[in-house]
Image (tube, rainbow, N blue to C red):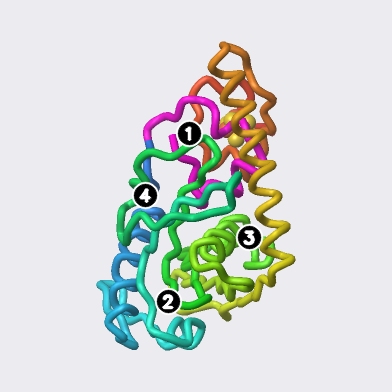
Amino acid sequence: MVVTASAIERITLCAASAAFPQGEDVSSGAASRGTKLHNLITPAIERGETVAECEEGEIDLQPLHEALGAPAKGEMALVYDTELRTARFVGHYIDRNYGEANPMEIGVTSDLSTDADTLVEIKTGSIPVPPPDSNPQIKTQAVALSSFRRLTSVKASLAVLDNKLKWKPIETVEFDALDLGWIADDLRALMIRVNQARDQVARGETPDTRPSWTACRWCRAINCPSRWERKSK
Ligand code: SF4
């Protein structure tokens, strides 16, 4: 199974979570709502529209255009090789179907990206999200984009749409060549840990697990002996 950038935060906390067989993906109501909003917003941005309408109301798209600073495309999917530090284009709107990937590769989709050096990640709802300079998913997107386009810096923004369809202040970070190099080093080290855990599972052993609320709440690992459970009083 291809490791994806959207799971990097969890896998960074617990590499074993990328090694165990995965259970069925049961999306929550909030996740389904988020998918619907993404499917509304990103094509509207591509068309240059400044407002998107849904059954809940209107969404002002101007803050996203300002963060992008140029026309953008939605859902660009790349596969990033953490060993070679290269990235290949897979398509747009592929619904995370990255196809075959080698064990050191990560599937990376950016919600919005320009033809230059800028990307925007959209989140919806009220779950706290790390700011872009410490957000594992956004950092992975930045490295993949820089590898694909041979960039020495990437401008990345986090746009959070609250439950009333209002944008929180958009946070932006510019990753320079040094930052991108450190992130690439970390991703390579992470994928080595993931593959060591995969080898252990293949031998019938149990890899080292790191249960935490942050990691386990998004994890569908079957056979994990140590899933984090809220202690009852
Ligand atoms: S359930 Fe928690 S401890 Fe187990 S593999 Fe997943 S993230 Fe790790």
Mark positioned earlier in the residue sequence (1 or 2): 2
**Residue placed at 65% from the left, 75% from the top?**
174
Q: Is 219 located above or below residue 224 in the figure?
A: below
C-alpha span from label 4 to label 2: 21 Å
Q: Residues within 10 Å of mark 4 (few under 14, many from 20)?
A: some
Q: Is residue 66 visible?
A: yes
Which of the 4 quarters of the picture holds residue 47? bottom left
Could you say where residue 27 lies in the image, as x and y percent from the top left?
37, 45
**Residue placed at 64% from the left, 48% from the top?**
187
The residue carrying mark 3 is: 135
Q: Is residue 229 visible?
A: no
Secondary structure, mark 1, is: loop
Which residues are drawn in magenta? 1-24
Q: Is 5 located above or below residue 148 in the figure?
A: above
The residue carrying mark 2 is: 115
View quadrant of ligand 1 = top right
Q: Is mark 3 within 8 Å of ligand 1?
A: no
Which of the 4 quarters of the picture holds residue 204? top right
